[in-house]
């Protein structure tokens, strides 16, 4: 009986991951050459030099150029926590460092009023620029925001 239950759970998990993988499509902020995988069917709210904002009924994603000159990799975790605190993000997780092929990054999760949010800073490995990414969503167990975040690339 345990084998059947485990097999059923595995099938459900694979079905859910297939749905998540299929629900993404390319998005690009042309002003700064940033590309990432976004939820399918998104609407572009802003695509200017000030920011790139897209949304679906479940997700609201904001990408902005980091203000200020010379933010250092060693400072991004504390700076991100400061921004989250200023935005009154509650129940903040510890910051998590990660690395992508073209970026060094840090993120945290928390509550943004009645929604969940993932805040991140991405610094290019060439130290030419940095970006702020915010993903607001509804389900606290949703793995898609982290998948979206880790899909960011610079277009060549």
Image (cartoon, rainbow, N blue to C red):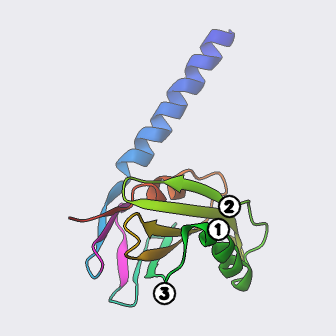
Please report contact status of discs 2 and 3: CB closer than 8 Å, yes or no: no
- Disc 3 target residue: 69
Report the residue at 40% width, 63% height from top: 125
| Disc number placed over residue 77 in the picture, else none | 1
> Foreground: 26 or 84?
84
Find out whether residue 127 is within the magenta segment.
no
Ranked by sequence position, the earlier of labels 2 and 3 is 3
Residue 9 image position (x, y, % from top left): 59, 26
On screen, 136 above or below 104? below
For marks 3 and 1, give the CA distance: 16 Å
Q: The N terminus lies in which quarter of the figure?
A: top right
Q: Locate residue 133 relative to residue 94 in the image: left or right.
A: left
Give the magenta part as a residue range: 32-46
Quarter of the figure with residue 63? bottom left
Whether residue 118 is visible here, answered yes or no, is: no
> Foreground: 50 or 42?
50
Ranked by sequence position, the earlier of labels 3 and 1 is 3
Element type at mark 2? loop
On screen, 79 above or below 105? below
Whether residue 10 is visible here, answered yes or no, is: yes
Residue 153 image position (x, y, % from top left): 34, 61
Ranked by sequence position, the earlier of labels 2 and 1 is 1
Element type at mark 3? loop
Report the residue at 65% width, 77% height from top: 79
Please report contact status of discs 3 and 1: CB closer than 8 Å, yes or no: no
Quarter of the figure with residue 136? bottom right
- Disc 2 target residue: 95
Please report contact status of discs 2 and 1: CB closer than 8 Å, yes or no: yes
For marks 2 and 3, give the CA distance: 22 Å
């Amino acid at each position: 009986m345990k084998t059947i239950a485990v097999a059923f759970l595995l099938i459900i998990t694979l079905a859910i991951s297939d749905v998540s993988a299929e629900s993404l499509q390319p998005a690009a902020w042309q002003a700064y050459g940033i590309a990432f995988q976004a939820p399918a069917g998104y609407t572009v709210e802003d695509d200017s030099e000030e920011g790139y904002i897209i949304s679906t009924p479940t997700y609201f994603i904001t990408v902005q150029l980091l203000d200020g000159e010379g933010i250092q990799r060693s400072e991004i975790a504390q700076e991100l926590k400061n921004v989250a605190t200023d935005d009154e993000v509650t129940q903040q997780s510890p910051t998590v460092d990660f690395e992508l092929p073209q970026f060094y990054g840090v993120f945290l999760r928390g509550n943004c009023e009645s929604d969940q949010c993932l805040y991140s800073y991405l610094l290019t490995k060439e130290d030419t620029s940095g970006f702020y990414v915010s993903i607001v969503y509804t389900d606290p167990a949703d793995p898609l925001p982290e998948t979206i975040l880790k899909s960011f690339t610079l277009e060549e």
